Amino acid sequence: MPPLFPIIGGGRLEPGDPLYTSPADGPELRLISNQLTGPETYSSWARDLRRALVTKDKDGFLDGAVPFPTDERLQRLWRKCNQLVRTWIGNTLAPDVAAGLPPTEDSKQIWDSIKEMYGRLNRARLFSITQSLTKLKQGNLSVTACFNRLSSLWNELESAEESLQGPEATLRQYRDIREREKSTRFLLILNDSYSAFRSQILAMEPSPLLGRIYQLAVQEESQRLATAEHARGGEGMSLAVFPEAVARGSSTAARSGYPKMGNAAAAKKTPDGNLTLFFFEWTAQIRTADPAASIQEG
């Protein structure tokens, strides 16, 4: 395993080393947009800030993975980086939250203090999120909007559960179960019109991952929209193709005694909404009124 603080020739640190800082890493930097205002925002705040510090190779200052070095050449650099992390944390705190923290300059101590004060497992919040997940239905939402709403609740739940502790194997098994629950929950909240699609997915072996299920649901929705659009286009085509014939037939009927397609009749639709079929029903009446027309056509 390479040393934690590799010194490059000439005493320079390379990017990727936890003690390396770039010219852009100033104390005024605000790593995330959200702010810690209290227990209700702790989960998302802690998650986003840790991720941001990972991109800076500074997350080790939060959990003690980067201890104070014994090499005197590195101690000044460590203090500098520790102070940067401490300042970056402070830049994302609401004023009243910052005022209530202990006056320590150690980034790990301040991180632990915040977690102790605001990061306790909020059972009431967990219950509220679980209730929202249970009640969520697709309704008038698109598949994408429905999935995004569901994902938002899952993210909140997972953030609130970050303080769960236990053996790693147990926690891993718990996460696997939760992933399967996500797929099932997504299928269940889809409208009843997706029952056939739901049955097809549940019958698949092996069970597809959530991302694949979402992709298939979007494809199913797109096909339905295309079919509905085609049906509406066909209805418009019926009126566009036959208007002159309808008008001509109506005037002819007035002179010959054939069945007349008046305004009310022209607006009539068959049960499936197809005006074309009704046009042929009307012409069939003409054939009945004029047997010679039927013989000639045959």
Image (cartoon, rainbow, N blue to C red):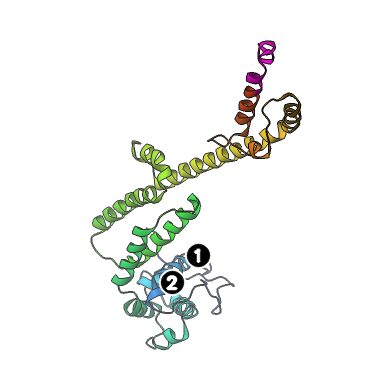
Is-magenta flag for residue 117? no
Residue 266 image-quadrant placement: top right
The quarter of the image holding the C terminus is: top right
**Disc assigned to residue 267:** none
The span shown in magenta is 286-298
Residue matched to label 1: 8
Single out the mark in the foreground, 1 or 2: 2
Question: Picture coordinates of residue 16 (x, y %)?
Answer: 49, 63
Please state which amino acid type lies under the numbered disc 2: Trp
Spatial CA span between label 1 and label 2: 35 Å
Q: Residues within 10 Å of mark 2 (few under 14, many from 20)?
A: many
Q: Nearer the viewer, residue 184 or 106?
A: 184
Task: For mark 1, give the secondary structure.
Answer: loop
| Image disc number at residue 45 | 2
- Residue 132 x, y percent position in the rendering: 37, 62
Q: Is residue 122 visible from the viewing direction of this image?
A: no
Is 198 above or below relative to 135? above
Q: Is residue 87 visible?
A: yes
**Residue 296 colored magenta?**
yes
Q: Residue at x 47, y 71 (%)?
A: 19
At a point 40% along the width and 73% down the height, the residue shown is 61
Q: Nearer the viewer, residue 200 or 243?
A: 243
* Left or right for 108, reference 146: left
The residue under label 1 is which amino acid type?
A: Ile
